[in-house]
């Protein structure tokens, strides 16, 4: 008996010592990654369980298998944080997209207001540029004394700088795909402004977004997939072949902006405006500004894909244009200034192929073509955009539900199908309505932190006042995944159109 106890004690001791030894052998960087997994932060999963020092891992093992990296910038529509008690919220659509395209790593820099901030604080979210919003409020006599809460959240520039500051992995994935989800909370807030001012800052925000994309592109071309100017055909650092880095396209997913007035929170949580403004006026402004934003993005996308960002093979040397270059890629490319006409003006990142003055001389088309040829010669990555009409996709779901309720259908066939939701108006998480039938509340809802939470979240289009529900996010993610997997990008459409035009001749 004594011998048996002795053996058991020795066995337990050996087990404990083994666990301690494993912990000591685990590198600190891996320990941090484990911590990020616990916190729900996305990481390079394929690199997690590698033991010992970096020298012990050969190059082939370090490669993540020609994987796809997904990098997310944006607001509450793409933020993947799930607080305690929000299990029914489900994965956001970029997470669904990640599964659809078999991505091997995902980085999410999106942010959103704490879910319990309302009603003590008005609803808000990530803005494209906090500087532009600060300027807009300073120009409005009714709003300039306000202490905005959105400044606590990182805007596009801050999120991009957070990504740029990360150390580059030793072996790059074969593809990197970026997501930009901005504009929703800009329009929500701009609707309060004078109409002329709202138009101005809407246009400025869209311009700022594309300027920031150029900064991200510069980092992509100089650090993530760098140019090798000494070789006529730069080496592809993923495959090791002597192939142009143009194979690594700078791919961005930009969803079409959804009208904020169609969300439950516009009615239930938006503060009643003070005079001389009104609810009707702000709703009209938001609808118009949403369309203006979308039109501005659509009008700029093709020109942005072709506009030049002059990049040296040396990462330290970046020039967005010769006349107004940013000396440091880590610095914001936009400065706030008020022009003579009172409009918000931007300085910093200006398209190199637009007509502009350089040292008092206008740049000619010949100079631009020459610069483009030089960039193609050194293998500069091409820009590409996947533009998905999220707005129409979701509006069709709402219309289908409305027509089905009324027993009607339209010429497009909406109303003849079956709505995937029991409700497209009431969110899963909502306030208690004291006029409701108590028995119905008990049957379908539970109380949590002073709010009612539905028992079947998948039956609701909206999770809460401002966010899509799990099934709706699944639908959007799968639809965007189909677009990406089938290669239906703007550049692909443009090149296909060019080929068809040549055949026609």
Image (spheres, helix red, strand yellow):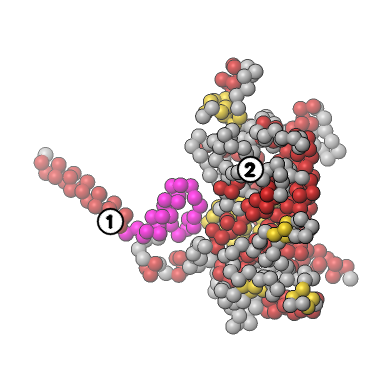
Tell me the distance, in whole angstroms, between the alpha carbons under discs 2 and 1.
56 Å
Name the residue: 71% across, 44% down: 141
Are the residues at dot 2 and dot 1 in contact (C-beta closer than 8 Å)? no
* Drawn side of residue 487 relative to residue 230, left or right: right
Circle 1 residues within 10 Å: few <14, some 14–19, many ≥20: few
Residue 333 circle label: none
Expressed as whole percent of the image width and height from the top left, the position of residue 83 reads 51, 39
Q: Is residue 303 magenta?
A: no
Instruction: State yes or no: residue 46 in magenta.
Output: yes
SS assignment for the magenta stretch, majority: helix
In terms of secondary structure, where does tag 1 sit? helix
Quarter containing the N terminus? top left
Give the answer, above or below, for where 214 lies relative to 380: above
Q: Which callout, 2 or 1, points at the residue further toward the start of the chain?
A: 1
Q: Which mark is residue 21?
A: 1
Above or below residue 207? Residue 260 is above
Quarter of the image holding residue 6?
Answer: top left
The residue lying furthest to the right in this view is 505
Q: Secondary structure at mark 2?
A: loop
In the picture of the structure, the residue carrying the numbered disc 2 is 146
């Amino acid at each position: 008996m004594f011998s048996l106890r002795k053996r058991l004690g020795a066995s337990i001791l050996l087990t404990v010592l083994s666990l301690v030894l494993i912990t000591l052998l685990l590198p600190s960087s891996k320990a941090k990654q484990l911590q990020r997994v616990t916190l729900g932060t996305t990481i390079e999963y394929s690199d997690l369980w590698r033991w010992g020092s970096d020298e012990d891992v050969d190059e082939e093992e370090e490669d993540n298998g020609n994987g796809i990296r997904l990098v997310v910038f944006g607001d509450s529509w793409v933020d993947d944080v799930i607080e305690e008690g929000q299990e029914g919220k489900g994965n956001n659509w970029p997470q669904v997209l990640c599964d659809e395209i078999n991505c091997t790593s995902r980085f999410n820099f999106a942010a959103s207001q704490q879910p319990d901030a309302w009603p003590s604080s008005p609803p808000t979210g990530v803005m494209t540029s906090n500087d532009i919003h600060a300027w807009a409020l300073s120009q409005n006599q009714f709003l300039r004394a306000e202490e905005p809460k959105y400044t606590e959240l990182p805007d596009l520039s801050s999120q991009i700088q957070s990504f740029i500051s990360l150390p580059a992995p030793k072996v790059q994935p074969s593809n990197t795909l970026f997501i930009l989800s901005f504009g929703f909370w800009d329009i929500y807030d701009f609707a309060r402004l004078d109409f002329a001012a709202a138009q101005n800052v809407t246009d400025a925000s869209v311009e700022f977004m594309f300027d920031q994309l150029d900064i991200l592109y510069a980092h992509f071309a100089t650090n993530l997939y760098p140019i090798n100017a000494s070789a006529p055909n730069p080496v592809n650092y993923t495959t090791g072949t002597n192939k142009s880095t143009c194979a690594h396209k700078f791919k961005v997913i930009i969803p079409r902006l959804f009208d904020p007035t169609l969300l439950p929170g516009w009615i239930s949580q938006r503060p009643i405006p003070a005079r001389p403004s009104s609810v009707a006026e702000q709703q009209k402004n938001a609808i118009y500004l949403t369309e203006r934003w979308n039109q501005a993005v659509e009008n700029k996308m093709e020109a942005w894909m072709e506009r030049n960002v002059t990049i040296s093979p040396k990462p330290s040397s970046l020039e967005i244009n010769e006349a107004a270059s940013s000396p440091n890629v880590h610095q914001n490319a936009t400065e706030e200034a008020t022009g003579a006409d009172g409009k918000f003006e931007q300085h910093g990142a200006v398209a190199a192929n637009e007509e502009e003055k350089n040292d008092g001389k206008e740049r000619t088309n010949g100079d631009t073509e020459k610069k483009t040829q030089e960039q193609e010669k050194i293998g500069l990555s091409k820009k590409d955009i996947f533009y998905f009409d999220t707005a129409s996709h979701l509006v069709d779901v709402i219309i289908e539900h409305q027509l089905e309720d009324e027993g009607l259908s339209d010429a497009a066939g909406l109303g003849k199908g079956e709505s995937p939701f029991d409700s497209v108006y009431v969110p899963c998480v909502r306030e208690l309505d004291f006029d409701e039938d108590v028995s119905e509340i008990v049957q379908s809802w539970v109380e949590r932190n002073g709010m009612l939470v539905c028992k079947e979240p998948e039956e609701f289009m909206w999770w809460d006042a401002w966010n899509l529900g799990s099934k709706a996010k699944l639908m959007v993610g799968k639809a965007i995944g189909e677009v990406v997997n089938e290669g239906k990008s703007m550049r692909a459409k443009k090149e296909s159109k060019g080929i068809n035009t040549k055949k026609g001749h």
